[in-house]
Amino acid sequence: MNYIEHIGKYYMMLKQVFRRPQKARIFYDALLREVEELGLKSIGIILFISFFIGGVIALQTALNLDSAFIPESLIGFAAKRSIILEFAPTFCSIILAGKVGSYITSSIGTMRVTEQIDALEVMGINSLNHLVLPKVIATLFFYPFLITLGMVLGMFGGWLAGVLSGLFSGVSYIEGLQTDFNPFLIAYALIKTLVFAFLIATVPSYHGYYVKGGSIAVGKASTQSVVWTTILIVITNYLLTQMLLT
Amino acid sequence: MIEVKDLRKGFGNVEVLKGISTTFHPGKTNLIIGQSGAGKTVFLKSLIGLHHPESGSIAFDGRLNTNFSIEEKRQWRQEIGMVFQGSALFDSQTVEENVMFPLKMFTNQTQSEMLDRVNFVLDRVNLKQSNHRFPAELSGGMQKRVAIARAIVMKPKYLFCDEPNSGLDPQTAIVIDNLIQEITEEYQITTVINTHDMNSVMEIGEKIIFLKDGIKEWEGSSEEMFKTDNEAVVNFVYSSNLFKKVRQAYLNETNL
């Protein structure tokens, strides 16, 4: 199957996904389950990675701006920009594409190969709407919150790294964080997050839903879904940056 | 009653079903048999609408499933119960949740009404104490019984079973066969079973269709199957020495 066919099939899938849920109560139950699976269970890894990467960004910036002519507050300013603009929305989304994407593909793919999706269809249930829509809504709702947490903890990690290493003072770092604050950058980061969240929910669902074969096929589909989600995040990141910041 | 006329289905250049016509009557266990690759599963999946036939028609009590409106199709789906080969239970749900799922989805019953119905059907399939267990905690035979309970919980008019005995020991297989036959007679359901278990054929086959290379090679009752001289049926059904002896004994007894 060529790329054009995949794109067409993906859009046909979305058409089925965005239908009115057949039973509101079942949809809300599924939504809460997905918020837990895709969102709450990802908080730990995002906080952990944000904290340490924030620290590394601050240390690297400090080591590369080691000059008497550059104010120390520039370290906090540069770290803030890096974290808000790229690290939190893009890097964290790629991490989530790996963690959540493989979970989505393998869970839906297993349902496909064990005929659970056929069972839903035979009952008269729109299986795409039933399985994928709660995932899309859960990620769109939860990931902006998750990425915002990542931003805050990344900046905190940078501050702590400076204080513990003695490379820069905590006061000048915080001064840098407060310098030239532009709220649009937060909006830009959250817009990117929403687009990435949509990709993280739908691309792996596509790979899982249309898997053919057995357990090996599900494994291959999981790998493919992570690769394609990452590629699409990187391309979309470039296009959104071009559109929103230039 | 289900009437199938000249049903054809292919995948790419391969024609799997080559014009099958037959009728399935209510209150009877109809069996589809044939070698692997004969088109049994494609035929069954075409009947339940998972495959779309290229030509031909399937009428459910006179209603052509190709002419259904969206609402009629939804209604028709609720009249169908299906037992899949691997049971296809939702592994994230308990036995009770699995069986209750169609009720939650398609009825406005209260929780206690749904629970009563679930307990009734679980009792009917002899699974009283397993409400809160997950499918992975059940044996193959128990999973099949849960699948049957889920299939009949909406009081279907048509019950389809794809290899209901596969992977089960002979004793459990007989229990499942008898359960399906009892339910079929009790609720006057039109039951279609896809199998290549010859014990099932002998035990519960009231009408048997033998498929060969996508064509209906033979059809009749289990008694007629003993008498038939159709070479393909005889070679397939009586391939084991045991069944050859059973057939010979039957023919001797009836002086045929």
Image (tube, coloured by chain):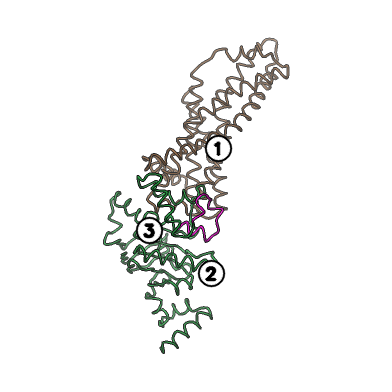
Q: Which mark is residue A97?
A: 1
* Three-letter amino acid code at the position of disc 1: Ala
User: What is the x, y in percent for residue B96?
Assistant: 47, 50
Q: Which residue is mark 3?
A: B48
User: What is the x, y in percent for residue B241?
Assistant: 53, 81
User: What is the x, y in percent for residue B194?
Assistant: 43, 66
Say which chain tag 1 marks. A
B20 relative position to A33: left or right: left
Quick one: SS at disc 3? loop
Q: Residue A49: within the magenta?
A: no
Q: Which residue is mark 2?
A: B170
B141 relative position to B104: left or right: right
Palette colour of chain B: green
Which marked residue is nearer to the observer: mark 2 or mark 1?
2
A216 relative position to A30: left or right: right
- Looking at the image, residue B229 lies above or below residue A140: below
The stretch of residues the image draws in magenta is B128-147
- Looking at the image, residue B88 lies above or below residue A201: below
User: What is the x, y in percent for residue B202?
Assistant: 45, 75
Say which chain tag 3 marks. B
Locate residue A29: give its quadrant.
top left
Say which chain tag 2 marks. B
* Three-letter amino acid code at the position of disc 2: Pro
- Looking at the image, residue B235 lies above or below residue A181: below
Locate residue B2: give its quadrant.
bottom left
* Three-letter amino acid code at the position of disc 3: Ile
